[in-house]
Amino acid sequence: MLVMAAVLALSACSKNDAESPESSGADKAVQTGGTLEVAYPTQPQSLDPHGTTAEATRDAAKVIYEGLVTINDNYEVIPQLADSFEVSEDNKKVTFKLREGVPFHNGKEMTSEDVVASMVKWSENKPELGEHEWIAVDDYTVELNMSQPSSLVMHFLADVGNLAAVMPKEVAESAEATGAKEYIGTGPFEFVEWKQDEMIKFKKFEDYAQDEDEANGLGGKKEALVDEINWRFVPDASTRVNGLISGQYQFAHMLNYDSIPQVENNPQVEVDVWPYGIEGLVFNKKEGLFKDVKARQAVNNALDMDVIMSSAFTGKDYYELDPSLFLESQTDWYTDAGKENYNPKDPEKAKQLLAEAGYNGEEVVILTSRDYEHHYNAAVATQQMLEKAGMNVKLDVYDWPTLLERRDDPSAYDIFYTGFSTSFTPHQYVFLDSGTQWPGWTEDPEIDRLLDEINAAASQEEAHDLYAQLQEEMWEYLPIINTGKNSRVSGYSKDLKGYTNLSGPNFWNVSINK
Amino acid sequence: MKAYIIKRLLSMIPVLLIVAMFVFFLIHMIPGDPAAVMLGPEATPEEVAALRDNMGLNLPIYEQFFNWFTDVARGNLGDSLYMNVPVMDAFVSHLGPTLSLALLAQGFSILIAIPIGVLAARKRGTGVDRTFMIIAMLGMSIPSFLLALLLMLVFGVRLNWLPVAGYSSLAEGVWQHVKFLILPAISLGAIQAAVIARMTRSSMIDILSMNFIKTAKAKGLKQKVVIYKHAFRNALIPILTILGETFGALITGAVVTETVFNLPGLGQLVINAITRRDYAVIQGTILMIAVTYLFLNLIIDLLYGLVDPRVRLSRK
């Protein structure tokens, strides 16, 4: 009876919907105040961004924390809590002049000792910095001294994916392995409370020290225009969509691709398609068939990237075929070097390469998980194409935590799919550096050499040229196959003004105009 | 009675011991590493190993069990690896939404199911009986997520009468609290109602055909008195059993409803803990759920004695 009533009510209501008037497009003056309701799919483990690259931490943490430097719209490094910074000619020393009069959420003024304590904690998980030391020169000057030159250090410091957040000295020093016990930063919003599995509440930080430069990327002027943000954890994708359409949430993160037409047809809601990163087919290069580069090249020739990406991401609006690891807007790094080896679609050559690699019909195992449908769909499409090229392919499907464990065992698989979010430097792509011993076990001295040279480069131009060589080598050696770039989709109410997305959604300078 | 209760309480100890061991070793046998889940797919093996060490996951399994079990025996369920809070706190904070939802859903199902069951039994074989039982059959067959999504679409999205999802605690006002629970309670209660209505009907039919009912009718008692005082009271025992079972299921089995309506209840707690491989939470919550079940069973058994004086609990 309930179902029948529901179906009747649905059909009775749908007509009204079609007739509902479009919201007036006229721009109203910015309204301040109100509570912003955000529906986010996952709960972070902690809001302390120092020890993790988890997106759930990144997106919520940047509301309350700031770093010495950050990025502009072109991913270039600009000062944030630093008033200015100077890198020495030999790339071994950076001097930061801090902004004065910047209060923490607990009322205390930020000084160099807070910065040093925070940076020491942040750099505990940063082997790429090598031997180094943070020094408080005076109350508003901090120095970073490194034993080896690094042209990348400013990129690491500006990386919001592992935000080098500045927190009070006593909070940084009392932190545990799983993160800080208190969430105190200098950002436009302050932490209020965390209801486990329900939501995190942030409120406007009344004493926020405004950077007077024009808003640009994640830096410049940041204003808390709403009084509160309720950051709700809504794991079910259809619930996020329904809440967005009903007006209960003003922002819903990560919509399912198949729900997008429903959202787009609603006049009260806007859809935001934003670049996520790359989809990667990772080879096990330690044991089995793909130790041989010819076998990896065979797979690269057997695949049609368009088919893989459309299976995983449904439509051309949500993916792009591109050999680079970086976005075109990342002008410091972007290059199409190696494009001749991207998506060659040559099954005959694949068969020939397989024969040269001595392939004899051994079983090739692809690890995958249905917890992430796009990885699973990419794996299914790959299986079919590899079988066409004469390979004997089996899918091993697990839940995601099991997959994360099995991929550490070189005898358990040959291939797995995973995503890599857009990084700020080549070094943060863990599959390149042999030193990381990341699953897949890349061992290419040429890539290692180029990574070292990029780090030691005297200028960004030189680093860019070296990276172009590295990308070319990557498409020869194939530590992974970068199948293409992909986008994710969020939805937001038309009442929401000023929303931007750069390395995740940003809620400063955002107002609710009803 | 007292002796009976003490005996029952003592008999819980071996059951809980077995549950504790079973859950601990089962969850540790499942592959998946909490440290790897916490650090994300781009973490290096070195970072994962360091965090495992910090969390005490590199100790031998028997040592981990011994540490956990001695803590549990002292009443300490440990700390959540992921949420950084004591497991007991997490359990208590997630119990609130689940309990409210279970009570509302149970209330809704009793209000609907018992009158329907009684009426169907009285009108046995008629059109009324058949109609109600077909509806009950349909109610039992609808997947709860489907009913949940339909209710959400109609009353939340289209009509905008009730919130689509979420939760508000009792401290924020009774109506504020209840309005978030109405749709989940209906979607959950509808299925329970179907089960209870069918049980009520068959139990009433059995009783109505007994000789003492014929006697009551022959004495000239009013129909209402015969049905509600004589028949219904005697039919209550199996209904109580099914109520106890369904309430237990409501507390522990509302995972789908809690996920769809985004209620931070016990179902969500367990599911999230499994996907995060948060061992302490899984173990502690399952143990607490087992305790809840055992107490519910005890309460139902005690209620039998109240409803039916022939059931003497203290008799050996």
Image (cartoon, grey):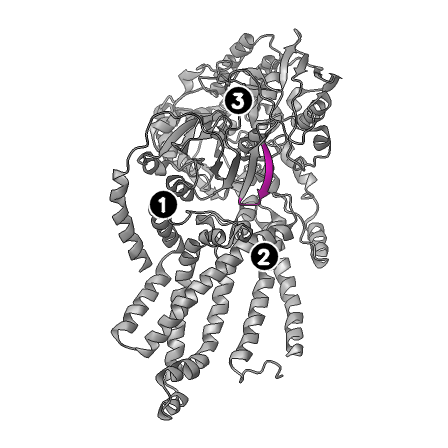
Q: Where is mark 3, residue-wise?
A: A218
Name the amino acid type tagged 3: Leu
Q: Are marks 3 and 2 in contact (CB under 8 Å)?
A: no
Looking at the image, is B292 positioned above or below residue A77? below
Q: Residue B181's spot in the image, x, y percent?
A: 46, 54
Give the magenta-colored segment's residue range. Answer: A190-198
Please give left or right for residue A174 compared with residue B96 in the image: right
Is residue A197 magenta-colored?
Answer: yes
Secondary structure beneath dot 1 equals helix
Q: Which residue is mark 2?
A: B286
Is the N terminus of chain A in the top left, top right, bottom left or bottom right quadrant? bottom left
Tell me the kind of residue under disc 2.
Answer: Ile
Comparing A182 with A26, the one in front is A26
Structural distance between the alpha carbons of marks 1 and 3: 34 Å
Q: Where is residue A58 shown, x and y percent of the image? A: 55, 31
Q: Secondary structure at mark 2?
A: helix
Q: Tell me which residue sits at (55%, 23%) in the image.
A: A432
Determine crowd level at label 2: few under 14, some 14-19, many 20+ residues with C-alpha closer than 10 A.
some
